[in-house]
Amino acid sequence: MSYVPIYTNSAYTLMNSTVKVNEYIDLAQKMGYQRLGLIDEDTLSGALTFYQSCLKANIQPIIGLKFSYYSQRMKRNLPLIAIALNYQGFQSLMEISTKRKCEEVVHLAEIEHVQQLAWVVNFEHPLANPEMENTYRLDLINEIKAYLPKVYYGIQVYEKVTQDFLETFDLLPLALSKVNILHSEEAFALKVLQKVQRGEVLTSEEIQSAQHSQAYSLLSEESYQRYYQESLPSALEHLSHLCEQVQLEIPLHQSLLPQFPLAVGKKADEVLKALCEQQLQAFHLETNPTYQERLAYELSVIHNMGFDDYFLIVYDVMKYAHDQKIVTGAGRGSAAGSLVAYLLRITDVDPIKYQLLFERFLNPDRQTMPDIDLDIPDNRRQEVLRYVHQKYGHYQVVQIATFGTMAAKMVLRDVSRVFGLSQSESSNWSKAVPNTLKITLAQAYQQSKDLRQLIERSKKNQLIYHVASILEGLPRHVSTHAAGVIISDIDLRRFIPLQLGSDELLLSQYTMNDVQATGLLKFDFLGLKNLSIIDDALKAMRHFPNAIRSQAEIPIDESETMKIFQKADTTGVFQFESSGIRQVLKRVVPQNLEDLAAVNALFRPGPMQHIDEFVARRFKKQKVTYIDPRMKEILSNTYGIIVYQEQVMQIASEIAGFTLAQADILRRAISKKDKQEMDKYRQIFVQGAVSNGVQQASANQIYDYIESFGDYGFNRSHAFAYSKVAYQMAYLKVHYPAAFFTALMKSAQNDVTKLKEYAHQLKKYQVQLLGPDINQSQLETSMVQLHTIRIGLANIKGTRKDFLRQMVKERYENGAFKDFDDFLMRVYHQNSHWLKEEFLVPLIAVGCFDQLGENRKLLMQQLSSKIQNFVISAGSLDLLETMTLSVDEQVAEYALEEKLALENQYLGMYLSGHPLDRYQSYFQQEKVLEVAHLVANQRANILLYLTNIKEITTKKQEKMAFITGNDGTQEIEVTIFPTLFRQIRQNLQVNQCVLIKGKSQISNYSGQIQFLAEQMYFNEQIQNQLQQKTCYLRFENGFENESLMYQLQSVLEKHHGTVPVVIFDALNHKKQMIDEKFWIKESADLYAELRQLLGEENVVMK
């Protein structure tokens, strides 16, 4: 008789176990266990992962559930354990778990299939309490046995249970030792985890006595058997018998595709065909043979794969969105390659016009679930989900769960708090971890010197790190998947356990992979902020005549819109905002959607290495060659370079005779880098190519080529769909800038950096930005005229949104506020608790009352007294008149610098001007670079208005500083090393302008651009420096000519001086200021030598 660890809580019993399912199975396998159990509390979140992993490890899985049932005798919930003997029993567990996680009461009388479950009580049940009278305990067991005929008593290792106790209550002993840690050294970490959950702090005694414990850890089979054989052998016998009864087989990968509700007698395939043919006529394509053949082929594949209903469901959802005037995306992923999807308006890219492949989406040779992702504005996603929920039913539409885990920064913060550290001390731990996505503690330890020093500082710190390392990665809370929704025509409780979600929709307990493993179909409804921006911009334009009303009215490849991309003026444009992709745009100079899609696809980690080659070939600086002339038609748009996955498929089809379906399987093999599969397909490819008239050597060369490019090629359908959304945003930016920026600023309401950047762009587009006004502003930023935007009240920091919302409502209902006193009076009568300086100071500071003729400084001075008067008078006008303040009419308004500082404090931007406005001409002359346009490792001059200075002392006891400032486009941190800091320290102060020469780099911690100062200038020094001339040298064919660069270096060194030199690579649109050692002294001889070397038109002094 062998022992089986059945009662194991996994980490899905949130914050009460450190057991990760896969680690549990790996360890148990090494220990020789052939059967394993999982019993979590109320949840089955880990059950299917556990089941599948056990099968892979050749271990028999046993699944149970600890839950609470309602005891009529005790009038409260009591714990009970149920173990599934088969799938019917497992379905009962799902029903129980769903009830518990949906906050429903579980009554024993209502549980189905009780005979298919083994029932266990243990030390956690009051039945085991020896202080309770036997008659009362008998009542409890009889209450259970009225519905559950056979009940076990689970005995924990080292628990003393007498035969008399078991016989008195007619209980069968069961060896059932609880596990919620795998190793004894995790015992203290578990205690910390539980305290994190309860918000408690360890005592100093608990920290000092931190030790290992075998209690609740996974022991060897021999250890368990030794105990039970000595204490109660029958407990092992019953365990063995129970395990033999378990015949659990959970059906996986079932065909659970939902059916679309149709009228009686209607067939899904016929309805789908009719809809597509109707739309083909609407597009005037019904006589086009290319479209007719493609449609017939796609409908045939869809029908044969059983997906007619699926397409009708998606069509119905999108039809609802369009009927409700909800903006939708052009498509996502490979679905844009489907003509059926295009005709049903699921996507908005013509796959035939843009040569997109259906087989990349649905492959008739490989039966997989269809996957159409629907992009919806994030502010209207719930509206669409509510429609689906109402149409199919409460238990038929369920969102998919995901888990927030204890990632590196979070776990250090949590653990350090439990150790009694202050908030700032806990922040020091999390700040020591670099801001790298998905970084682990082990990686952070290697990368961060600050973290290593923190750990080495004390034994307590070493313990904090050790505990955090154990807890890292554990699930912390249930969350909702950003997009995934299950739709079914059958009650989902039959297939998966559910739990309460948000916004009326239930949530699966399983995560996405487990949901898909059951065979249920996942639909992705992704809320996109960029579609909300388009939606809001279109809404803003509805009030103006002749403005477009929908996306459909936006023309494609319009020249003015393309100029936005050519100039890389893509602030706020989806997919094209980063400084890196802007550089690519300048080099490629896109002319149409085809070019945009290529840039989008090229700017990825793999293809990026071929950008130089792409640009050189595009502008005929490098010859385009093809191994076989038949590849020209496939690769001509990308100048002989494989950019898209579909090109791999087309080459395999054209050269080697593959069907497109077979070619898709080849593409998948290449993308997975499966050498065995790739070698197999090489042989098939070469044979096919040779029989198609290609020389064997050339066939191998072509295969090498697609093998090297195909593993990172981008999805062409996705590139076109997303580039179309980007193009639509750019169109709105060019033609309706006020509407576009209104929507953009609403979307970035809480992102001060973005708001500054957008506000700066408004000047370029001749859009006026008005400040907040208590009588004119809406809650959110709004477009008030065709070229005018007014900032919303909700943008003001430091006050309350509910207060501001009520003030807007008050204004609508009772008219504009007459003056500040009228405003205070109405605030008082709405809610006297809002009459506080902390809520009102921000409104005054940003000028909300300026249009009422109020003086900001005077209002600030009088605010406290005015509030006091309103409180004393209880808002009585008569009393207030007797308490009128004597007003000093001579109080001068704030100076401009003071106004700007307050505006920046409460709005994150400057409204009354900008301290750097007097230097604008130097930005236009490019003598200084805007911070928003800085890229990594760029030498430049920047002008900043300083907002913060932080001095530190180095290990060598030298002073240095980090300063923060902005130039109206963006904020940036600047590092000043000790040598320079000693020179400029006496001039350095906040709220002043400073010119900084230096170099940009990426911060290891924030991942943002920072600047390293080499020289700094203040006051009149700034003007003197900027008035100095700069020499600009243009290189027509880039910097590749080493001989030319060497000659230039010699000329510059010979004429060394103080005039800065900027070199410009015209081929790649790169500009940089060169090192100071190559600056020059003006002279006629210098000009002559430079012009002879580079050409007269390529040397400019200004």
Image (cartoon, grey):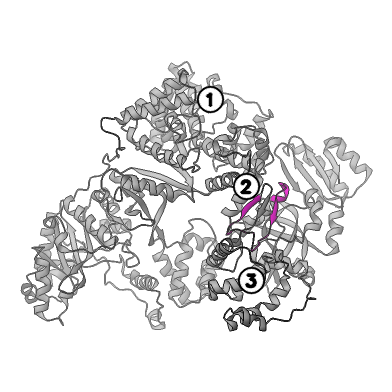
Q: Is residue 42 magenta?
A: no
Residue 522 in the image: state x and y as whole percent.
Answer: 36, 44
Which residue bears the numbered disc 3? Answer: 822
Crowdedness near tag 1: few (<14), some (14–19) or many (≥20) residues, C-alpha within 10 Å: many
Q: Is residue 513 above or below residue 130?
A: above
Q: Residue furthest front?
A: 878
Q: Which residues are magenta?
A: 762-784
Q: Amino acid at mark 3?
A: Asp
Badge 2 element? helix
As drawn, the label of residue 501 is none
Residue 661 in the image: state x and y as whole percent.
Answer: 39, 28
As drawn, the label of residue 739 is 2
Q: Amino acid at mark 2?
A: Ala
Query: If you read the primary sequence from the N terminus, does the residue marked by circle 2 or circle 1 appear first?
Result: 1
Q: Is 853 displayed left or right of 351 in the figure?
A: right
Report, in whole angstroms, how far the alpha carbon at label 2 lies from the one at label 3: 33 Å
Q: Given this view, does label 3 or label 1 mark the residue nearer the observer?
A: 3
Q: Is 1000 displayed left or right of 205 in the figure?
A: right
Report, in whole angstroms, how far the alpha carbon at label 3 lies from the one at label 1: 72 Å
Badge 3 element? helix
Q: Is residue 934 visible?
A: no
Q: Amino acid at mark 1?
A: Ile
Q: Residue at x 43, y 32 (%)?
A: 344
Crowdedness near tag 3: few (<14), some (14–19) or many (≥20) residues, C-alpha within 10 Å: few
Q: Given this view, does label 2 or label 1 mark the residue nearer the observer?
A: 2
Which residue bears the numbered disc 1? Answer: 634
